[in-house]
Image (spheres, rainbow, N blue to C red):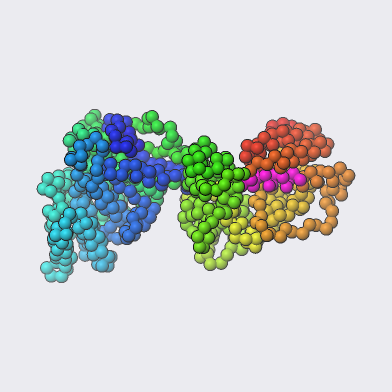
Amino acid sequence: MPRLVGCGPDGRRVKFEFASHGPYVELIGGRGAGKTAVLEHLRDAYSQRIPQAHADLGAANLGMAGLAPFAPGTAPNASAVTDLLYYLEYQLHQRFRGATWRPKPLAPPPLRCPRLVYGLLAVTAWRVGDDKVPAPDLLAARAALAQLFIDSQPTPAARQALVNSLTSTVATMVTGLVGVPAPIDEVVKPLIETVGNRLLSPRLRRRAIGWWGGRKLNAVGDSWAQLTALSLNFRAGGPSRERAERHLVAALLADVRDYYGWWRRFNDDPGPLLLLDNAHTELGTLFLKLLCQAQHETIETTPDARTQPPDTRTQPVVVAAALGDENAHTPVGSVTETSGWTRPSTAGAPESWLLRLGLRPLTADHVMEMLIEARADSALSTPVTELSDGRPAVVAGLVAAATGREHGEPDLGALLGLGEGEPRTTVCSRLLDGLLPDPLARQRLTFFAAALDTPAAQHLSVAFPRGDGGVLPVPATLTYLRADHWSGGRRQGDDQAFVADRTLRVLLLHELRAAGPGVWAQVHRRLRSFYEDGGAASAERTVRGLHHALALGDRENVTRGLHRLFVKDHARPWLDALKLICAAPLPPDGLTPPRKPQDGCPTCAEHAPQAHQTHHAIGRLVDALWRQSAPAAVPRADRIDLVALQLTILATGSENDCCQDVLYRAHLTWPGELRRWRRAPDLTIPQGGDR
């Protein structure tokens, strides 16, 4: 970032990486990847150093408490883009101290945007006679515009004078001399001149008007005709409105270029900084598109720009953050020395002005550093990394919860269950607040999290609590998962799991467990019945049904099912089944397990007498591996040794040499994987013979 801005966070001069225009940066990552934290760090690091503006493009008020929601797309005189430009202009206009190498008496003046102000005024401050928006809404929009200009006046007397001038001017233009609206081309010039004379110096006014005169929105006509065409294009909607918005973004870029003239470039003044959060939204996608197009057109139309491109400091530094798959883009950590970005040619695509960087997960070493800095138990570094998948937001929440607690054996389950306040809010609940900001989607996902696939979730939806308001909760939830990019993280089980992301599924199941034994039993009984009662019987359906049986604590029937598969199936598929079954979540305290069957094991009866030893070995193996595979479990030597012993017993009892080989290899490798915090269903089945 310092190489783009030309200034470090300490205010000292940094050499620019690019001799000409640099890229606009877009940080890509999933929920909890730290995108917002990066923008907030940049905002605080460069506070008072350079002009800057910060906006949350996913919030109706752009992230500023007290602002009214941005304009709907149907308003003829305003849009989300114009509201955003108003807000950015307002922030860029604020005074700042400047870089440390500037002489203190020569603190830089605020950045003015006369071209943008004139364009916004022409677009938003008037309505033609056939507009179908109630006059009060338009008057409110004009009042907001007036307030923006009024706030910029230095003294109460100046503000009152502007109020009086705007009030009389707007009132005259709204009613006309005979009580009907005047033609728009008779309104733009007097309105803009009234505001311009109050707010801008003669030099800025001349430059702004002259710039609009060269925009060629209309084939003929002076600056006022071009501004009138801008307003008419905006009101036409569709592609014409987008074209008008692109001219407004170009006006912002031109104002920045004008502000950074030869004197500020001579002093190495760093450029302004625009920080845009949630750029994956409709507004964010459109604004970045307009920004790149306006930048590309500037290079194409500026004299000598192709051979002598303008200085880097004549453009704003834009850092946007967007939801997406971070693995599909260059890691941000790989551009510490050079970005590798090259300026696109005039024949290139405008999108080439974006440098997309992926925010990679934190490593165990990073987590260790955070724990040490917080004076928390450093033994938590591995379990926190495993549970969070390196997501900075989850790591930060867990580290904060661990701060001040006594050191000892790591207990992530207890950590997630810590709570405070009334009503009590747990650590897990706070983490989900950040990962799933939509409360309805969170409610649905918590209920469906235990489902191993989408058909099972559909079966479960019949028991979904009433009052949700959604007719099709499963398709709606799948749409939300795709839109929020919850398909790019590490997987839990196979890729068809309804909630495939490991971290999210663990937290949701913890939330479901906290709902109590009744809800837990209802969910897993319904899911178990889907595999046992519906459809043709198959080994896969049997295994998935046993997964939910184990989540209900029905270990005896799980042991019987695995015993039956053991004598029928190949060794590799049997180990795959064992892993999926033992990945079942632990039930909540207070859940009454099903009654044990009164009759004996049918498989034992068919294959006696050695089958009894196999049956007991499978039961002990299931219990040890299941408990060791819980997300909050730490490696325990007694459980791991028990897993190894039972695999040895099963290998010894097998009559097939290939089966013995596969089970014996698992006996050699699984204990080491379990000690390294690996757990079912991710244990590997070593290569070897098969039965």
Determine the image quadrant of residue 165: bottom left
x, y percentage for residue 345? 31, 32
Question: Can residue 317 be seen in this snapshot?
Answer: yes
Where, quadrant-wise, is the N terminus in this rendering?
top left
Side of 650 relative to 512 (left or right): right
Q: Nearer the viewer, residue 492 or 552?
A: 552
Residue nearer the viewer, 43 or 403: 403
Quadrant showing the C terminus = top right
Q: Is residue 72 above or below residue 406?
A: below
Total marks placed: 0
Q: Which residue does the image show at 32% across and 31% down from the upper left?
A: 17
Magenta stretch, overall SS: helix
Residue 85 seen from this side:
no
- Residue at 44 percent of width and 44 percent of height: 34
Q: Position of residue 286 (x, y in %)?
A: 35, 48
Q: Furthest-right residue in view?
A: 609
Q: Which residue is at 86% across, 45% downward?
A: 607
Q: Is residue 111 left or right of residue 590?
A: left
Q: Nearer the viewer, residue 478 or 337?
A: 337
To which quarter of the image does residue 359 belong?
top left
Q: Left or right? Give the position of 381 relative to 184.
A: right
Residues in magenta? 620-633
User: Residue 647: x and y, percent?
Assistant: 76, 38
Q: Residue at 65% across / 37% down in the picture?
A: 675
Q: Say above or below: 589 vs 266.
A: below
Q: Position of residue 396 (x, y in %)?
A: 48, 46
Please check the rendered image and state whether residue 287 is part of the magenta-colored stretch, yes or no.
Answer: no
